[in-house]
Image (tube, coloured by chain):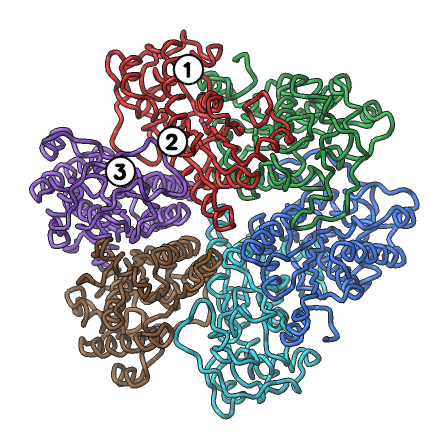
Chain colours: A blue, B green, C red, D purple, E brown, F cyan
């Protein structure tokens, strides 16, 4: 087995050895190209889902497929809205088709257990549709043991970790875009890509209970962050990663076995 | 103005009078055909979104379009899963296309303000895509003042109402499928369609933080309900309806004016 | 077996009992949201196909799925044209996809015999495509005994009934939009939704042998009716319903057995 | 103007001269590849719509685009059914897309008046959708004077001609597949492609008022013809062509001017 | 076996005899409607692929399906660009769908060996996708021995022929649009459709190594030809046809047997 | 201007500064996940197109969008075929949609000049379609100055470089998959990802002039390389990069200005 967990860095012959066991497991990280405030780069979602997948892959003896660098349209209530400059998104059709295609290819290789690790809130339902279509088609075509999982990494942050990361109280996942969670993880995983001197510090965005079309730019803070990342630290990022990693590993093992 | 709020019951000439003012507002209720336990019918989501839309339409002098009776695939973590008998769902493609088509037709009629009132959790992102495509196309085609809103009715239940409806504590929207909220609303709005003698009484489903493909029937209680509807009453339904109605009316008025 | 024929009013557990026999039969009524003159509501096609399906279902021990409330674009030569205000139509893509999806779901439930009951002329070919795709996919996926029928209800009006309903001579189905047939059926089935005092009385529309794009509003009478509904009566509606009902029941029984 | 009416035989420079007047008119013949009994070839529908288009084009100073040689799935009630060997059909998606694409290209060339001449019953609604999408898109893109017509050639056969061609009485268009009409036209236009010694002579098919899925081969006569072509003659074909040609020319002139 | 190689000229009963052997082979010629200079008609690509297919079919005892008369968008580097008047092209979606549909129909007839003979450079990848989808679907549906080939006819011109046809040196396939190769073949196969008195004589187009969007008309010579057809002769066309025919026959026999 | 050329590493505020000039230029590198022999990783095409884009971006003061890590199905005549384990490809639909979506987003940001830099032969026509659709839609929507280019990097290798890199003669681009060109570029750009001790050394693959469906594994060498990479060196890679970089810069400058 090669010394890398990343499919793009592995040669095909080593990968074929891996798949030939019939026990292979591949994680597909999915992100977005989306504004994340003035202090973090556009690729945060892709970087985090890729890094978290790689960490979990170590424990699962799994491989990590090339990250989906583009995601579904950013929405104002979770990502600031798709009207922002820099946010570069896919339509539903494109994301569904890509998900279906890639998962079917992995099944064709002999991989029977695929996990999609989502790092961009807005992606979830379209990844779900792509996975549903892929698993149906694989099974209709005779690959009866094809299975898949779908998860968003933040759903594995437990209460204890939340308390540690948000000592003043957690205000909800919806406003975490560009906030303490993502910034802490970036400070731990890619500190050179964060510039805390540019981090905004403003009250949390007051989100409405609905969406409007076309988007109303006034509904998103000028920074693009839905809450302040001021409390972010690399230590908190390390704790978050550790919690998420172990949670994902437990979940995958529970469903797919060792 | 005709004496009905429902587009399907209105004649075209009266509707044309309504749209000719340029101030028309149409609500589109969207539901699903989905199992809701042994005590409630398959059409609950469509019935509730339609009734709530009609109530809000009274206050808004709006009309209600024919309900979307079919919705996106039920998911185990919010609706029991699409493997259940009776659940009859649409693909992403079909729901997105229907949403886009219907909204564009309303714009063509002269309606410039459309509100999609969602009654089935799984629909949201596909309605969003359909609305986004419709508003973009309408505006590219010259209807520059076309606007739309998207909301799910439960997002307008406030904390005071939650406390009143769930005196023992609210366990979360995710397990409300077939539970106290929907059953109370049905007892208030369509009591003849509920048979509380068949209502299950079991502990809340323990939901995982992820989805699996293909679905695992063992993850959903046999009843199809994710929590017990035992605490449902018509009075609680009336309170819920009142809260949701006024919340929606406030939101629409806030965005679209009187 | 529950006391309703309507799927949306049935609970999933009773439905599962019904499907478990392997002898289940489901009718899918399809209509439109389309102008039907000043004397009838926009929902006529959906209302009629639903009521006719329910009547036939009684005799066939069948169930009726939620009606397709939206149909294909109204055409000037059969429905007055899609440019009319109030007419709210689907594209080919949306209607084909919805038909395919819903029929496949019924097959998944264990239903092996599906009948689509069309109530809107323009729908037919798109329902045909959806059914063809669904039955092919079901059979390719192993459901080898999946079968379906497609019919338009007016094709079951026999000559004797035509003579009774049109004592002065029948002028052809093409101009029956908003005319005697539909109005009579509505007067019988939903009299409260018809206002004969608003019924137009003008000569039949002179239809061309072709279509034009974009539609030319001058080709449709201002009323939206292609012929006068003046001769409509509830008695004629009752006769029409009786003829159509028994014709459909004979046809379905002939193909699918008792 | 070049000496041919067929676009495929014309060079681009001559065509550009033709379009540059702004008065150009192009007819698009559409047919099918479909069994037409043992006495006629698979290409009958395409051959007839192409020849009829060419005849009308002479009178209209129009051009004829390459024929659509493949059509929508043959249906048992109009063409014998798509299960027959030799019948080679398109899905709705393919036919709609091709229609839209070709019409938009003609508009781009400067042609503002397009007529689709249908020669295969089952095509009509899909051609309609393609035309509707094309004209909408052309106009949304600024080609405000783009117009189109859609017609099926048999809709221009008048009563006098019917009486002359069917002296024993006309039994209806539905059973004319491979019968007297098409065979007479072929005997007049392409006699070398008809072998009357192989023409079947059996009673008309008894068509049901509905369709079944999958198709039931027993519903179509073994010959593939829905009625006997025994009465077909070249003279009757000549009469039919003359009637249809003049009818189409009148209709097009009436809509589009000289 | 009937005396024609063209499916459109064959009756369905004779075709059924042909397919019933299980050894049938069908060639599908694909072309375009595309400007080919002032000296040749718009249908060159379709005419050539059809004629070449017919020639090869003689040697292979094969049949030839109706030609695809419309192809993918002409590109400046191979066909002069899609902005030219007369060029009438399909989108990727339409061409892929048509290819998939037609190939699947032939498989349904009992044909197990299909060859697509391409005559328009820009088509290749879309024909490839259509064939890939068709063969996958046929095999997933149980037609396990379905096979197909895809080729462009000019890939069978060998070096000796190139030297004979281009005695002054061959400049590359990319600039052959409307040049010596196509013109020679047309002079041999359809001399009445070529007017050498209108043939342009200008230096070869200087093609860039990239494409631009929107197309820049200045990049294509005014004639529409990418090189001069001055050296074209019927004799060279005969030689080209002979070489291509025998090359295709050898390739097909090598893959599919006699 | 920020210190990175990679959009994913740039924050949205700095990017907005860049786009606000109206002179922005973005390169989109596109690759594949495809076997490249035992000595190189699956991500070669994506790595090379990204690195080449970054190099050109330096000279052009341009930015580089996140690479398209997945490409169209590998074909035996250019990439070894899509049946190989490790090759993970997109359908035409997915690649076209993704291209269209991403290009339209960049136009929305204020970027008016987009260059797609292709690194995987099979992608070209699908990128072309996506670009054509995007530019048409952007212009129809009012962005009249939107422009794009499409190129494959190897088309900028000139004859002098070919002679230097292939002193024994260049055998053609078609067999360069996994050969000297790609391996040399990788040895220069990512030497740590190449293991020359695993490089195969076998005669070039003898490619046929056609494709077969389903693919025939015997047509590709076991190594997955279509020719031997034995002659690859980092120096040759450096030369290739330099040539390609300057060629692309010249081409872009020539079309889009400085």
- x and y percent of residue D148 in the render? 30, 40
* Quarter of the image where one finds residue A44: bottom right
Label 3 marks which chain's residue? D
Please state which of the two labelled residues, at mark 2 or mark 3, is closer to the viewer. 2
| Residue visible at 46% across and 67% down in the picture | F214
The residue at the far left in this view is D235
Q: Give the secondary structure at mark 3.
A: strand
Q: Report which residue position mark 3 lands on.
A: D151
- x and y percent of residue E235 in the render? 18, 78
In this rendered view, identify the residue nearer to me: D115 or B226.
Answer: B226
Between marks 2 and 1, how big is the CA–CA gap? 40 Å
Q: Report which residue position mark 2 lands on.
A: C254
- Residue C38 numbered tag: 1
Please state which of the two labelled residues, at mark 2 or mark 1, is closer to the viewer. 2
The reply to whether the C-beta atoms of the residues labelled 1 and 3 are less than 8 Å apart is no
The reply to whether the C-beta atoms of the residues labelled 2 and 3 are less than 8 Å apart is no
Q: Quadrant of the N terminus of chain A?
A: bottom right
- Residue A79 numbered tag: none
Q: Is residue F222 left or right of residue E213?
A: right
């Amino acid at each position: 087995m090669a010394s890398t967990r990343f499919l793009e860095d592995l040669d095909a012959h080593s990968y074929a050895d891996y798949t030939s066991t019939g026990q292979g497991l591949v994680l597909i990280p999915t992100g977005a190209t989306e504004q994340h405030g003035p202090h973090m780069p556009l690729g945060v979602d892709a970087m985090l889902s890729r890094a978290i997948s790689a960490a979990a892959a170590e424990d699962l003896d799994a491989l990590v497929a090339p990250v989906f660098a583009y995601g579904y349209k950013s929405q104002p209530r979770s990502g600031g809205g798709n009207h922002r400059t820099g946010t570069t998104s896919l339509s539903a059709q494109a994301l569904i088709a890509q998900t279906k295609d890639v998962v079917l290819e992995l099944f064709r290789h002999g991989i029977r257990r695929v996990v999609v690790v989502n790092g961009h809130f807005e992606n979830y339902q379209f990844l779900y549709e792509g996975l549903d279509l892929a698993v149906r088609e694989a099974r209709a075509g005779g690959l009866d043991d094809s299975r898949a999982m779908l998860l968003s990494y933040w759903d594995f942050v437990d209460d204890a970790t939340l308390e540690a990361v948000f000592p003043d109280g957690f205000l909800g996942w919806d406003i975490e875009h560009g906030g303490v969670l993502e910034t802490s993880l970036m400070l731990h995983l890619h500190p050179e890509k964060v510039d805390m001197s540019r981090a905004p510090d403003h009250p949390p965005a007051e989100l409405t209970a609905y969406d409007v079309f076309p988007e109303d730019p006034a509904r998103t803070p000028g920074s693009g962050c839905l809450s302040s990342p001021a409390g972010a630290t690399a230590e908190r990022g390390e704790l978050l990663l550790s919690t998420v990693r172990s949670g994902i590993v437990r979940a995958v093992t529970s469903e797919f076995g060792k």
